[in-house]
Image (cartoon, rainbow, N blue to C red):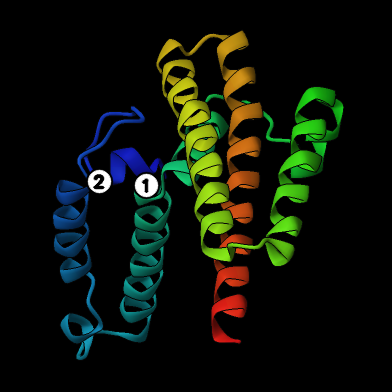
Amino acid sequence: MNYFQLFGLDNQFSIDLANLSTIYQSLQKQVHPDRFAHASSQEQLVAVQRSTEINDAYQTLKSPLLRAQYMLELRGVDMPDEQATVGDVSFLMRQMELRELLAEIKFADDTDAAIFEASQVFESEFEQLFSQLQVQLSENTEQSNGLACDNVRKLKFYQKLQIELDKLEDELLDD
């Protein structure tokens, strides 16, 4: 089952999230367990399976990185694991620099300023990669899909880094 088809959407990266949510609610109403309370156990099971499928599709399509990864999978692009970024020496070096930036926050004279600066760096670099990803997905060539695959992995790294920064901020502000 193609998630885009399930929701009646064009297979493209840019989607209207409000429309996606509306369609999701409509689809879920059609398979809600209450509608199948007096149905056979087989029909109830099918409704639960369908509901799960709709929910999985919705979670995938509403998340930009999951949507990008799904689109690449539909295109037959094999998504290597996230450790594959080790092959990109310049990005590996950047990862190390960003991890150092994160580690130094604990020792900063002005913790708030250091957190803000790190957040700005992470956000700026994320947005730059995200813009590249959008172009690469729209081009849909073998080369652009390969580059998009690399950028999805890089963007996941930035998401994890932002989560770590948020946790660090909570730790430091709770003290």
* Residue position marked by numbered label 1 in the rendering: 61
As shown in the figure, which amino acid type bears the numbered disc 1?
Leu
As drawn, the label of residue 5 is: none
The residue closer to the viewer here, 89 or 116, is 116
Place of residue 54 in the rendered image (x, y in percent of width and height, measured from the top left): 34, 60
Where's residue 89, x and y in %? 85, 25
Q: Quadrant of residue 164?
A: bottom right
Residue at horizontal 64 percent and vertical 19 percent from the top: 146
Left-right relation of 79 to 1: right
Q: Is residue 51 above or below residue 71?
A: below
Helix, strand or loop for disc 2: loop
Contact (CB < 8 A) between labels 2 and 1? Answer: yes
Quarter of image, res 31: bottom left
Residue furthest toward the bottom?
Answer: 38
25 or 119: nearer the viewer: 119
Residue type highlighted by circle 2 = Phe
Q: What x and y, as percent, mark residue 170?
A: 55, 76
The residue identified by callout 2 is: 7
Quadrant where the N terminus is found in the figure = top left
Query: Residue 30's spot in the image, x, y percent?
Result: 17, 67
